[in-house]
Image (cartoon, rainbow, N blue to C red):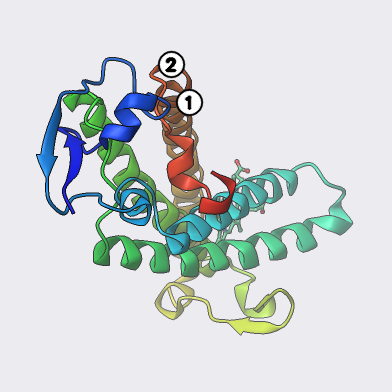
Amino acid sequence: MTTQVISNGRTSRECRSRMTIGVGEKCSVTTARHFLGSREQKSQAFTYSSTAIVLHWVIAALILVNVVLGFGANYVPDEYVRQFVDLHKSVGITVLGLAILRILWRLMHKPPLLPTSYSPFEQLAAHSVHWMLYVLIFAIPVSGWLHDSAWKEAATHPVFLYGIIPWPRISWIQNIEPTTKERLHTILFNIHVYLNYALYLLLALHIVGALKHQFWDGEAELQRMIPPRRR
Ligand code: HEM
């Protein structure tokens, strides 16, 4: 069946309704044979898969929880500090596992197209921020794990994820001579903290960009990352 699409992949019906058409987006109709024929195909072209959506929101929620736990450990009474830090490590290692899955998923799947109404600068900025976020969701837990492995009391405080699953320290760090290890412990903590600062900055850009596209440009930006039933 012949389907009419405009140059940026919108169907002619969308052009007519203008519900999903961005400001400044042209509706010059061309004809294509098999492109975006069904509702399902159209949805696949512009939205993330369920796997990507679940990983995105679970990782985002766990990172938020872990920032609260990481900072919270500085402010809670002494008797709760260990519980906070231990839970922080468990959640952080969970994020590491999910981040690896997310990055593998991303390497094996093409993300949905960005609307062509986005300027080349916006497209480049969006892709750059996404890749830097992938790096950070991996590097932050790894830096925490390295920092924790350099802790002088690591041997007497083994890690059990959620109090149940034994989790190893990185042995070559544990075996470093104590004075150097203590210095490394401090350096790795600073790296952990500064990577978190970078995360806050990139998250702010990511969120401001998404909100700008949604509410200023009138694009269905947030719908790309929510489950189909809720769209
Ligand atoms: C989602 C991943 C993670 C995030 C977002 C995160 C974030 C943070 C933040 C915001 C702090 C507080 C920094 C400060 O006090 O200025 C912190 C501290 C810390 N993090 Fe992480 N972290 C993550 C993963 C991990 C992992 C996987 C480990 C270890 C296995 C870890 C070990 C630590 C330790 C030991 C501290 C110091 C806590 C204290 O003694 O007060 N982190 N982290």
- Residue 219 horizontal/vertical position (percent): 39, 27
Where disc 1 sits, the SS reads: helix
Count residues near mark 2 (Cα–Cα under 10 Å), then give few for <14, some for 14-19, many for 20+: few
Q: Does the CB distance between marks 2 and 1 fall below 8 Å? A: yes
Disc assigned to residue 216 = 2
- Residue 3 horizontal/vertical position (percent): 20, 45
Disc 1 marks a residue whose amino acid type is Leu
Pick the front one: 117 or 59: 117
Residue 89 shown left or right of residue 124 in the figure: right
At 74% from the left edge and 49% from the top edge, which residue is drawn? Answer: 73
Looking at the rendered image, the quarter that the N terminus falls into is bottom left
Residue 51 vertical placement versus 1 (above, below): below
At 66% from the left edge and 59% from the top edge, which residue is drawn? Answer: 88
Q: Which residue is mark 1?
A: 211
Residue 85 shown left or right of residue 218 in the figure: right
Quadrant housing residue 101 = bottom left
- Residue 40 horizontal/vertical position (percent): 37, 56
At 38% from the left edge and 48% from the top edge, which residue is drawn? Answer: 47
Residue 214 vertical placement versus 149 (above, below): above
